[in-house]
Amino acid sequence: MKFQITLFLTVILIIVLIFGGCISSFDQADLKRNDADKKIEIINDQGYQTCKWYPNPNSYPEYYEEDNKIHKATVLHRVTKDCETNEVVKEEELIKLKNEDGTQRYCNYICRDRYEEQCIKDGSFDKYYSEWCEYE
C-alpha cells in the first residue's frame, strides 16, 4: 500500500512538473513576444462582435491614433514573407475590413510592412506580414 501511495504521488508530481513547466514556459514566451496580438471583444449596438484580434498597442501605436488614415482603410492586401529571404511564402490575401453598414469587420492590420516587429523585435525571425491598404 505504501508503494502505491508513493507511486501515485510521484506520478502526480511528474504531471504537475510537466504541465506546470509547459504552462510556465508558454507564459514566459508570450510575455517576451512583444508582437503578440491582443484578443479584445468589442460588441456593436446590435450585439454582434465586431473584431476579435487587434494589433499590439506596444508594437503598433499608430493603430490607436484616432485621426490616423488607417481607420479609413476598406481593403487590406497582405502577403506573408520569410524573414531571412524576404520571399513570399503565402500569396496575397485580400481582406475586406468593413461590413456593408460601415462597421469594422477585421482589425488586425496596420497597412505597412511588419518586418521590424515580427522578425527583429519578437526574436522569432520566421515570417512577417507585408501589407498595404485601399482607402475610402
Image: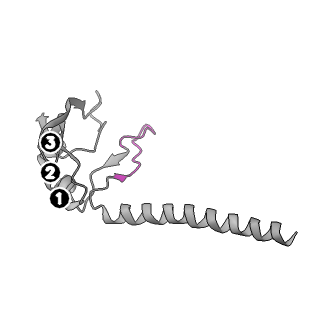
The answer to whether residue 28 shows anywhere in this view is yes
Q: Horizontal placement of 37 versus 49: left or right?
A: left
Tell me the distance, in whole angstroms, between the alpha carbons under discs 1 and 2: 7 Å
Q: Indicate the secondary structure of the residue bearing disc 1.
A: helix
The answer to whether residue 65 shows anywhere in this view is no
Label of residue 120 in the image = 1
Mark 3 or mark 1: which comes first in sequence? Answer: 1
The spot of residue 51 in percent (x, y) is 35, 42
Above or below for 15 versus 132: below
| Type of colouring | one colour
Tell me the distance, in whole angstroms, between the alpha carbons under discs 3 and 2: 7 Å
Q: Are marks 1 and 2 in contact (CB under 8 Å)?
A: yes
Mark 1 or mark 2: which comes first in sequence? Answer: 2
Q: Residue at the spot x=24%, y=31% of the render?
A: 95
The amino acid sitting under disc 3 is: Ser
Pointer 2: residues within 10 angstroms few (<14), some, or many (20+)?
Answer: some
Mark 3 or mark 2: which comes first in sequence? Answer: 2
Image quadrant assignment for residue 44: top left
Q: Are marks 3 and 2 in contact (CB under 8 Å)?
A: yes
Image quadrant assignment for residue 91: top left
Residue under numbered circle 2: 115
The spot of residue 108 in percent (x, y) is 27, 45
- Numbered range of the magenta stretch: 38-51
Residue under numbered circle 3: 130
**Position of the C terminus by quadrant:** top left
Count up the numbered dots. 3
Q: Residue at the spot x=26%, y=33% of the render?
A: 98
The spot of residue 40 in percent (x, y) is 39, 51
Q: Indicate the secondary structure of the residue bearing disc 3.
A: strand
Tell me the distance, in whole angstroms, between the alpha carbons under discs 3 and 1: 14 Å
Q: Residue at the spot x=29%, y=38% of the render?
A: 106
